[in-house]
Image: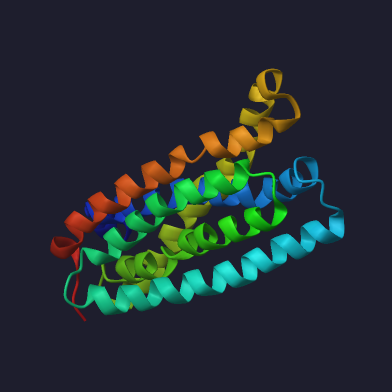
């Protein structure tokens, strides 16, 4: 199964696109509480309420919305499984940056809410596409290999990259360096969008029908 997947460009583009987005996603997830306390002055309890509400509302809407869009658009156009995440990542960038740079807690929550949902849209379409790159009996293995790549790169690198970038920017921006670290790291969503769009182009020829 690994050899069959290795020959399909769609698999690598989807895997590295998801890994790039996860670098930013895991990084923001880890460092956002620090940003809320350092730059917005929230207490630990307030930070927990902000972060919990964001993940609950944005996460549920994003995962369900992505699955619905994938089912609706992907039936007639297999490329949609790549194009949907690509569009979501690009739309999320300006909203995330605006939320990061605002000084209002309420504005930050509302501005984060939409891109938080957009950041989760990829899960349904991409996992569905990965499973359709192989015959039905090999789908669990394909998903496992995909998630291995995604988490090794995303979880392994994102948190450390954003922290290191914040330290690097500290002499320039002082206590606000974490804001700029997160903002500059949005380049990972640009990379993810490009890779997902390229995957969308090759999905129709790599697709394995039921």
Front one among 15 and 122:
122
Left or right of 205 in this view: 193: right
Left or right of 161 in this view: 79: left
| Relative image position of residue 120 (x, y in whole percent) | 48, 63
- Residue at the location (46% across, 77% down)? 64
Locate residue 75: give its quadrant: bottom left
| Relative image position of residue 39 (x, y in whole percent) | 75, 41
Locate residue 177: give its quadrant: top right
Left or right of 41 in this view: 94: left
- Residue at the location (56% across, 68% down)? 59
Is residue 137 in view from this perspective?
yes
Q: Quadrant of the N terminus?
A: bottom left
Is residue 161 in view from this perspective?
no
Q: Quadrant of the C terminus?
A: bottom left
Residue 163 versus residue 121 in the image, above or below: above
| Relative image position of residue 183 (x, y in whole percent) | 55, 38
- Coloring basis for residues: rainbow
Left or right of 118 in this view: 104: right
Front one among 145 and 19:
19
Front one among 65 and 139:
65
- Residue at the location (67% across, 35% down)? 178
Locate residue 82: give its quadrant: bottom left
């Amino acid at each position: 199964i690994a050899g069959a997947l290795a020959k399909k460009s769609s698999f690598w583009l989807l895997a590295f696109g998801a890994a790039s987005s996860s670098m930013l996603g895991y990084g923001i997830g880890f460092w956002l509480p620090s940003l809320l306390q350092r730059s917005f002055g929230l207490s630990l309890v307030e930070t927990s309420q902000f972060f919990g509400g964001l993940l609950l509302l944005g996460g549920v809407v994003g995962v369900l919305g992505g699955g619905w869009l994938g089912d609706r658009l992907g039936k007639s156009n297999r490329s949609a499984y790549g194009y949907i995440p690509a569009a979501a990542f690009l739309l999320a960038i300006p909203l995330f940056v605006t939320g990061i740079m605002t000084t209002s807690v309420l504005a930050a929550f509302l501005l984060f809410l939409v891109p938080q949902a957009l950041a989760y849209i990829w899960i349904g379409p991409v996992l569905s596409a990965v499973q359709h790159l192989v015959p039905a009996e090999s789908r669990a293995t394909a998903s496992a290999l995909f998630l291995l790549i995604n988490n090794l790169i995303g979880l392994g690198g994102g948190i450390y990259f954003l922290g290191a970038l914040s330290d690097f920017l500290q002499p320039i921006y002082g206590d606000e360096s974490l804001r700029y670290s997160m903002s500059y790291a949005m380049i990972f969503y640009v990379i993810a969008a490009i890779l997902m769009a390229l995957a969308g182009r090759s999905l129709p020829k790599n697709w394995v029908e039921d």
